[in-house]
Amino acid sequence: MICDNMETMTQSRHETAWVTISLDEYESLKATIETLSSRDAMEKICRGENELRTGKGKKLEGVKKELGV
């Protein structure tokens, strides 16, 4: 899981001559990097994972019903 090794994450450099991806994929990768680089966001994700593990989470169908979706 992401939270289990949050403190031991390291950066590595990988060089290639050329990579072609769609603009949508590029934007998605940028958003993922931004989230993974944010200590606040990662702490919230870890807190949520811990809540799910301890049974404090809600099922999607229950949330939808609460919101009237």
Image: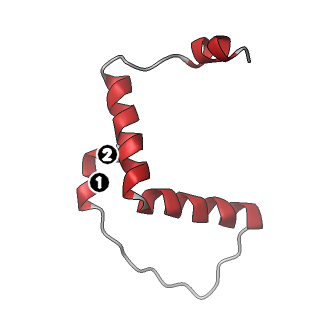
Question: What residue does disc 1 label?
Answer: 6
44 sits left or right of 67 in the view: left
Q: Seen in the image, is 50 located left or right of residue 67?
A: left
* C-beta proximity under 8 Å, tags 2 and 1: yes
Q: Position of residue 49 (x, y in %)?
A: 37, 33
> In terms of secondary structure, where does tag 1 sit?
helix
Hey, which residue is sitting farthest left in the picture? 8
Query: In this orientation, which residue lies closer to the viewer: 37 or 21?
Result: 37
Of helix, strand and loop, which one carries label 2? helix
Residue 45 vs residue 64: left or right?
left
Q: Residue at x 24, y 60 (%)?
A: 8
Task: Give the residue type at disc 2.
Answer: Cys
Q: Residue furthest bottom?
A: 17
Residue 50 drawn at (x, y percent): 32, 31
Residue type at mark 1?
Met
The coloring applied to the image is secondary structure
Which image quarter: residue 38? Answer: bottom left
The percent coordinates of residue 34 (x first, y second) are 51, 62
Circle count: 2
Judging depth in this view, the residue of 39 and 9 nearest the camera is 39
Residue 27 quadrant: bottom right
In the rendering, at what x and y percent does residue 23 appear? 75, 67
Residue at 35%, 36% (x, y): give it: 47
- Residue at (74, 18) in percent of width and height: 69
Name the residue tied to disc 2: 3
**Cα–Cα gap, marks 2 and 1:** 5 Å
